[in-house]
Amino acid sequence: MITSNIKKINEGLKDCSYIIDRYSSEEEYTINPKTNRRLLIDYKVVAFPTKEFQSEQYRTNVHYKNIENHKISSQGKAIIKPM
């Protein structure tokens, strides 16, 4: 069950290759004292976005701040700050 979930996570990460440049996964195991079998206790994925995605997010955040902090002219229209 857990291995199929991990496979689904890895497939999802590969499907998001247009956003995720590279990723690494870390697994942490322990031993069950009753059965002496390995148990997965932690699974961590570190993802690094693509440069295109980073710049798109930056532009979106700057645009949102400009909208939030816009000034209104005497006619009641928004004055857009220069980018």
Image (tube, rainbow, N blue to C red):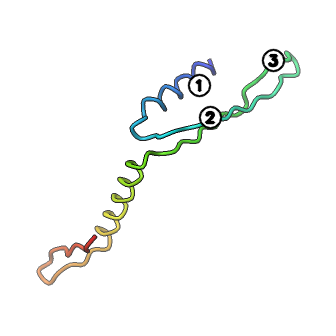
SS at badge 2: strand
Q: Of the residues under marks 2 and 3, which one precedes in the sequence?
A: 2
Dividing the image into 4 quarters, which one contains the C terminus?
A: bottom left
Q: Mark 1 touching mark 2, by CB under 8 A?
A: yes
In this rendering, the label closer to the viewer, 2 or 3: 2
Residue named by callout 2: 25
Kind of residue indicated by mark 3? Arg
Q: Position of residue 50 (x, y in %)?
A: 43, 45
Please report the residue visible at 35 percent of the width from the left and 53 percent of the height from the top: 56
Label placed on residue 37:
3
Please report the residue visible at 80 percent of the width from the left and 28 percent of the height from the top: 30
Kind of residue indicated by mark 1? Ile
Q: Residues within 10 Å of mark 1 (few under 14, many from 20)?
A: few
Kind of residue indicated by mark 2? Ser
Q: Residues within 10 Å of mark 3 (few under 14, many from 20)?
A: few
* Marks 1 and 2, how far apart at CA: 10 Å
Q: Of the residues under marks 1 and 2, which one precedes in the sequence?
A: 1
* Marks 1 and 3, how far apart at CA: 18 Å
Residue named by callout 1: 6
